[in-house]
Image (spheres, helix red, strand yellow):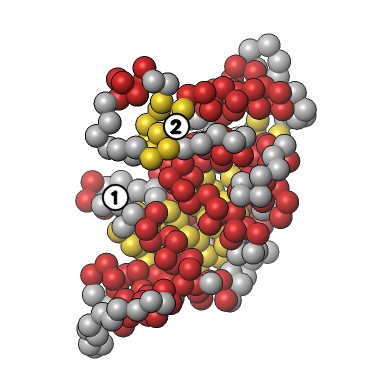
Amino acid sequence: MKKVVPLKISKNVDELLKSFEDCGALGAGSVGRANSLVKKMFDQDYFMFLSFSGHLIAAGLRNIISDLIKQGKVDAIVTSGAGLVHDIIYALGGAHYQGSFNENDEELKNKGLGRAGNVLVPTKSFESFEEFCQKNFEKIDGPLSIQELTHELGSFLSDENSFLYQAFKKKVPVYCPGFQDSMLGLQLALYNQTKSLVVDATKDMMHMNSLLEQAEKVGAIILGGGIPKHYTLGANILRGGLDAAVNVTTSTPFDGSLSGARLEEAKSWGKASAKSSLITVYADATIIFPLLISGAL
């Protein structure tokens, strides 16, 4: 048995995370162990998935994700439709504003503001997004897969902090299995009222499988839950499961939801291998993800 080592104050993030791991208790222990596992996956050149839900882009994690792509630390992205939408809004110069969980939402509607938690987004930003979509859909030939569509969208951007743009430059596939459940999906539906751009939602599965067949070891950093989490795990069934993964989530496992499920549950489905290294951290990803990446790099 390892002793609990009392935590130490440090001005160095790496030393602080090492203190978390040495302590080993409660949330500090899980964060410290997660940091070591992320380091291992980066250092040993795992094929790396980064999975996140869209609100995390609105909430400020965009630049960190883009930097990881720039540095070659990410081999595949899995996100929600909102992740694409908010990244494009930022890239078009649209701002996101600090708000409160206690806002008067009727007043926000009258002011032309939409609320995601305590982040406010002007509805005018979506007008620019709509123009971007309708103009650029014209330039895309279908039928194509969802990741081929996200690749094309990234090619129309020039913002260095856009993860879509960086993924386009670095040829990192961006998968978005639920893209139709977003403003992007709505814009495509509206476009297809008079024209036709066919997207094959099943084509990505075989594309992912072909990449994973060549990978010796596969790891994942999964922020949040929902479709991005499940798609990342499910993609690995045909290769016998993930070899390592860290999931940061605020959901709990006790209602049977996938979002809160401990990663070990994936072993029962073959989505994680029997000998895989898996760590679930129950915490806010906007706090933990920057710490893990800062420590790992």
Place of residue 93 in the rendered image (x, y in percent of width and height, measured from the top left): 59, 36
Q: Residue type at mark 2: give it.
A: Val
Q: Nearer the N terminus, badge 1 or badge 2?
A: 2
**Relative to residue 201, is residue 286 drawn left or right?**
left
Residue with the mark numbered 1: 251
Q: Is residue 22 placed above or below 201 in the rendered structure?
A: below
Where does residue 225 sit, x and y in percent of width and height? 39, 48
- Look at the image and tell me in which quarter the N terminus lies: bottom left
In this view of the protein, can residue 210 be seen by the observer? no
Label 2 SS: strand
Up the image or down, 163 lies above or below 28; here it is above
| Rendered view: 243 above or below 136 | below
Res 115 → quadrant: top left
- Who is closer to the viewer here, 277 or 15? 15
Tally of marks: 2
Seen from the viewer's position, the closer of residues 58 and 22 is 58
Q: State the separation of the CA atoms marked 1 and 2.
A: 25 Å
Q: Which mark is residue 121?
A: 2
Tag of residue 14: none
User: Is residue 253 positioned above or below 113 on the image?
Assistant: below
Q: Indicate the position of residue 70 as horizontal and vertical percent values.
A: 65, 59
Residue in the picture at 38% in, 61% down: 288
Q: Is residue 57 visible?
A: yes
- SS assignment at label 1: loop
Indicate the amino acid at tag 1: Ser
